[in-house]
Amino acid sequence: MQLLGGLSPEEFLKDYWQKKPLLIRNAWSNFPELIDYARLTELAQQRDVESRLIEYKDGRWKAESGPFRASRFSRLPETDWTVLVGNVNHLVPHTEDLLYQFNFLPYTRLDDLMISYAPPGGTVGPHYDSYDVFLLQVSGKKRWQISSDDASGFIEDAPIRVLKDFNPEQEWVLEHGDMLYLPPMYAHYGVAIEPGMTYSIGFRAPKTQEIAGKFLEFLQDEMCLEGMYSDPHRQATRTPAEIDKEFVGQIGEMLKNITWNDETIRRFVGSYFTEPKPHVFYDQPDDPLGFDEFAAAVAENGIRIDAKALVLYESDRVYANGEALEFEPEALPWLQELANQRKLPAADYPESLITILYECYEYGYLQLS
């Protein structure tokens, strides 16, 4: 894959993934269009888009969150700032296509494509991320310095995560189409030399605390525990404020009824990793086609997963946006193909498949091609 500098996915995963950085010259040049500064700032003005503006002025960091007014960008100086827009793959089709070029990794790990624009001097400071990231330079030039030393800690009062001390070990200038892969916790510092964009392809790495919390929420909806606290042999007490050992022991016995198995975890994973982010909403069709019209449209043009949606499967279960789908068993192979390829070609499909596709279409999870 040219995307990986001629390495096969297997070679990249064996030698670099979560192990060491990789610089790839001319990794990607197949851009149907280039998002310019004007287009990016238009996105940053939308309420349903995550955006930030970071400036470095007079030795201090300043960070603002969008949505922004157009006048905010007109007041910016010529240097030393960066505007960032997240989840651009939800908004611009060709960036979604680029994101899914990384499908040699499971979709459970693939997160989003963020775009940052910076004039000369623009930077978000030396920092490290807790997840894997590919940094693709698109137009302009940016100097990247990296270091395996991330132990200095972050500046306490800064509004963003900036390392106190940064001692670069390697340095490169990336130009249009060049890409840098960085494993988690690898310190890096990018500074724009010329006005340009950086496409950041990030990967999900949820914290154990987050997973545990979400799993307990999931169990709450899954559990149906029988019984009630009782103490028919209770003795009179002279210390009514004391929490006695027998009470604690019985509560402990009740809690032991909370159990789970591998199947519970599989259902949780399917639900959690397809659940949309809080700011994501789906546009249901204003004038949806009837069932027969929909079937004819799929037969003629095919269908695709909406850019904001994710479909995953395991065994004979298929999940979309936090829910397990209900469908006839014969539809499973096509649903798995849809999940892997994110689209189905034009064809006459059985009614059992069209039924579940139509349901997802009505919710806004699928779009006709």
Image (cartoon, grey):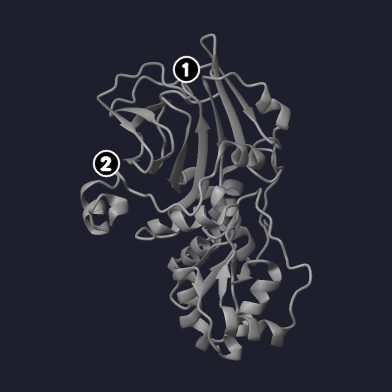
Front-most of 86 and 91? Answer: 91
10 vs 169: above or below? below
Residue type marked 1: Ile
Identify the residue under disc 2.
Answer: 22
Q: Quadrant where the C terminus lies?
A: bottom right
The percent coordinates of residue 135 (x first, y second) are 39, 40
Q: Residue at x 53, y 86 (%)?
A: 347
Q: Is residue 327 visible?
A: no
Q: Position of residue 288 (x, y in %)?
A: 75, 74
Residue farthest to the right, as pictured? 287
Q: Is residue 166 above or below residue 362?
A: above
Q: Nearer the viewer, residue 255 or 246?
A: 255
Q: Is residue 323 above or below residue 10?
A: below
Residue at (36% x, 49% y) in the render: 28
Q: Secondary structure at mark 1?
A: loop
Is residue 115 found left or right of 104 in the rendered image? right
Asked if the residues shown at circle 1 and circle 2 are in contact, with their CB atoms under 8 angstroms apart, the answer is: no
Task: Compare marks 1 and 2 and give the one earlier in the sequence.
Answer: 2
Image location (x, y in percent) of residue 363: 69, 68
Residue 26: mark in rendering = none
Query: In the structure shown, which secondary structural element does the residue marked by tag 2 occupy?
Result: strand
Give coordinates of residue 231: x percent, y percent.
67, 56
Q: Quadrant of residue 132?
A: top left
Q: Name the residue located 45 percent from the left edge and 54 percent from the top edge.
A: 99
* Residue density around tag 1, few if under 14, some if 14–19, many if 20 or more, within 10 Å: few
Which residue lies under the disc numbered 1? 155
Q: Quadrant of the N terminus?
A: bottom left
Residue type, label 2: Leu
How busy is the neighbourhood of tag 2: few (under 14 within 10 Å), some, or many (20 plus)? some
Q: Residue at x 41, y 38 (%)?
A: 130
Q: CA distance from mark 1 to mark 2?
A: 28 Å
